[in-house]
Amino acid sequence: MAANPEPGSVAEVRESLGEVGYLADEPAALVAYLAQRLGKPVLVEGPAGVGKTELAKAISRATQRQLIRLQCYEGLDEAKALYEWNYRKQLLRIQAESGAEQADAAGWDAVHGDIFSEEFLLTRPLLQAIAATEPVVLLIDEIDKTDQEFEAMLLEVLSDFQISIPELGVIEARTHPIVVLTSNNSRELTEALKRRCLYLWLDYPEVEREMEIVRLHAPELACTPRTWRGRWPASWSRSCTGCASWTSRSRPRSPSRSTGRARSCSWAPTTSMPRCSPAR
């Protein structure tokens, strides 16, 4: 897959994101443009379900780059994020060499240099993105679920686009990846990480904007110029206006379980399905 050339303007980025199904506002389009022109990572923060992860996917589709995703979780370490050695394969090689010749100092040095080569290296998402021969989009999703030690490990990747492996040396990026980090803002990230990134805050869209998003993902719904009256009229059952208004109205009532654009888009098509009669 050949990556598209660098964009010429913010408007071009916004249009390309719209063509792949992502309605980006001006700040999101600007940050996506700067990420490609300046080669800096992007940190996207905001509530769950507002389109942070989808933005990285849209950039991948718009630029025709492969998406490499690292899903963060509590306790994530470098063995799952960077690399680890294939110990079983190394052990088999040592046993094979020991059976073929007597183990002496020279023989061990040869085996030692052999088992710590790329043949025995298990690549994880970060190393996979750095070592990729084609341009990629690296998504580090929900970075706020990790700890500060993991953030410190990321600094070399975010600033120099390289990974240091003691047994092999420094592996530099063959191509320049577009790096997108997302955070639900569950904890404060370190200043060292923030300084290395462009910043974007995504919030819940306004009703009019959400109507556009619902219309894009559920074109079978009719969009009528109605307003929210505090109830759910029967005439709204197949209206993207009603879907967008209801989700917007429900957010202040339950801030801990607010309905984001992702849930709206997945729920909207069900409103056009015929209702089932209750069992008698």
Image: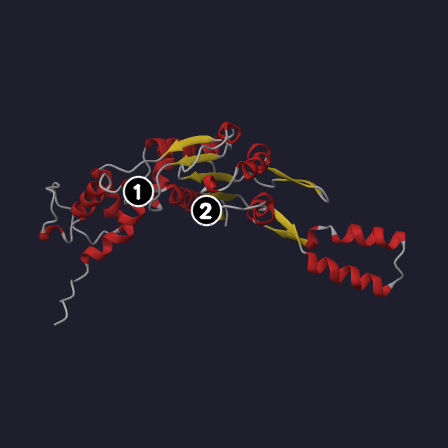
* Nearer to us in this view, 20 or 241: 241
Q: Helix, strand, or loop for circle 1?
A: helix
For the C terminus, give its image quadrant. bottom left
Give coordinates of residue 210: x percent, y percent: 24, 41
Residue drawn where x is 69% and y is 54% of the image = 120
Q: Which mark is residue 89?
A: none
Looking at the image, what colour scheme do you see? secondary structure
Q: Is residue 125 left or right of residue 280?
A: right
Q: Is residue 147 left or right of residue 275?
A: right
Asked which quadrant contains residue 245, the reply is top left
Asked which quadrant contains residue 13, the reply is top left
Give coordinates of residue 114: x percent, y percent: 77, 53
Q: Is residue 240 left or right of residue 205?
A: left
Which of labels 1 and 2 is toward the front?
1
Q: In this view, does 253 lie to the left or right of 35?
A: left
What amino acid is at disc 1? Ser
The tag earlier along the polypeptide, 1 or 2, is 2
Residue highlighted by disc 1: 256
Q: Helix, strand, or loop for circle 2?
A: loop
Residue drawn where x is 75% and y is 54% of the image = 115
Residue drawn where x is 25% and y is 42% of the image = 254
Q: Mark yes or no: residue 8 visible.
A: no
What amino acid is at disc 2? Gln
* CA distance for labels 1 and 2: 36 Å
Q: Is residue 99 above or below residue 170?
A: below
Residue highlighted by disc 2: 64
